[in-house]
Image (cartoon, helix red, strand yellow):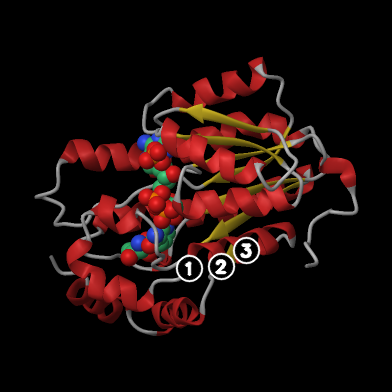
Amino acid sequence: MVLNCYENDYEHMNTYALITGASQGLGKYLAVELAKRKYNLLLVARSVQALEAVKKEIVRTHNITLTILVLDLSAIDASTKLRDFCVTESLEISVLVNNAGFGLWGSFERLSMVDQQNMINLNISTLTSLTYHILPFLIKNKRSYILQIASTAAYQPVPSLAVYAASKAYVLSLSRSLHHELKSKGVRVTCLCPGPMETGFSDRAGMQALAHLTEKYNMNPEIVAQKAIKEMFSGKIEVVPGVMNKIQRFGDWLFPKYMTERIAANLYKK
Ligand SMILES: NC(=O)C1=CN([C@@H]2O[C@H](COP(=O)(O)OP(=O)(O)OC[C@H]3O[C@@H](n4cnc5c(N)ncnc54)[C@H](OP(=O)(O)O)[C@@H]3O)[C@@H](O)[C@H]2O)C=CC1
Ligand SMILES: CC(=O)[C@H](N)C(=O)O
């Protein structure tokens, strides 16, 4: 298998890829793809057991250094704690993957504001502040990469996922701006906009009742991760994996917003 990036160029050897939300789901497979390319890994999530299991699985196959850090990234000081850990451990970071995130399914006024604020803290605030605080590590390298995880939900408002979809629209907008701002500094920014995947997302979002819908369009997160990392190293600004997701993206562009919003409202109605 030909792995793009720099398998013949050992500039990145001994540097780390920092991946948030790597204890399961998409983040775990993104970690595997970077381990294949001989990156050392710093994996961050809340569940120590799940992180330990991922570590055991990866180091069994790949000869890299893998460090885990248990941290609730929805906490306001999480990004500075993570930055301080990287300074204390003298980690050279050349890839940042802001993957940790979750959704909440339900009407805006009925969902808990505390839970929705936590989602904003993780999906928006920590993603932004971690990008800011890790940037100095990335700029030290000749080539570095940032992979931000948004969603196809970024392309249109989704009633019953109102704050979640808005958070992903923010991630997409921020990523596209930073792609241009940071190019001259040797930092390539890519935004991944996947559609539904077979992960723990739906359970956490409380979307079990929509299983008939999500399972119909679910993508394998391992396939999504392979596409995402390949396109990140090729410097692509925006990645929409899967034909159905590309069709949805085209439809969101082509049809009037009111029409696509009504379709989403009916699809995701709780
Ligand atoms: N699955 C899908 O249908 C889609 C998902 N996405 C996006 O993909 C990304 C990955 O989600 P996915 O893999 O699907 O979902 P999962 O729920 O399977 O994984 C989420 C990961 O994030 C971690 N995480 C969640 N909350 C926190 C927190 N407060 N602090 C630290 N880590 C946290 C979890 O670990 P732990 O619980 O141990 O903390 C886990 O490793 C998310 O940003 C999501 O929005 C986008 C489109 C579709
Ligand atoms: C809204 C979804 O079903 C999906 N999890 C996504 O984030 O696009």
Circle 1 crowding by C-alpha within 10 Å: few under 14, some 14–19, many from 20: some
Circle 3 crowding by C-alpha within 10 Å: few under 14, some 14–19, many from 20: some
Callouts 3 and 1 close, C-beta under 8 Å? no
Left or right: 33 in relation to 206? right
Quadrant holding the N terminus = bottom right
> Which residue corresponds to the image point at 58% horizontal and 33% vertical from the top-left?
132
Circle 2 crowding by C-alpha within 10 Å: few under 14, some 14–19, many from 20: some
Q: Residue 220's spot in the image, x, y percent?
A: 48, 68
Callouts 2 and 3 close, C-beta under 8 Å? yes
Residue projecting furthest to the top: 88
- Residue corresponding to mark 1: 220
Say which amino acid is labelled 2: Ile
Quadrant holding the C terminus = bottom left
Calculate the distance from the C-alpha at mark 2 to the C-alpha at mark 3. 5 Å
Compared with 2, 82 (above or below) is above
Left or right: 91 in relation to 26? right
Q: Circle 2 sits in a helix, a strand or a loop, which is it?
A: helix
- Confirm whether residue 218 shows in the render: yes
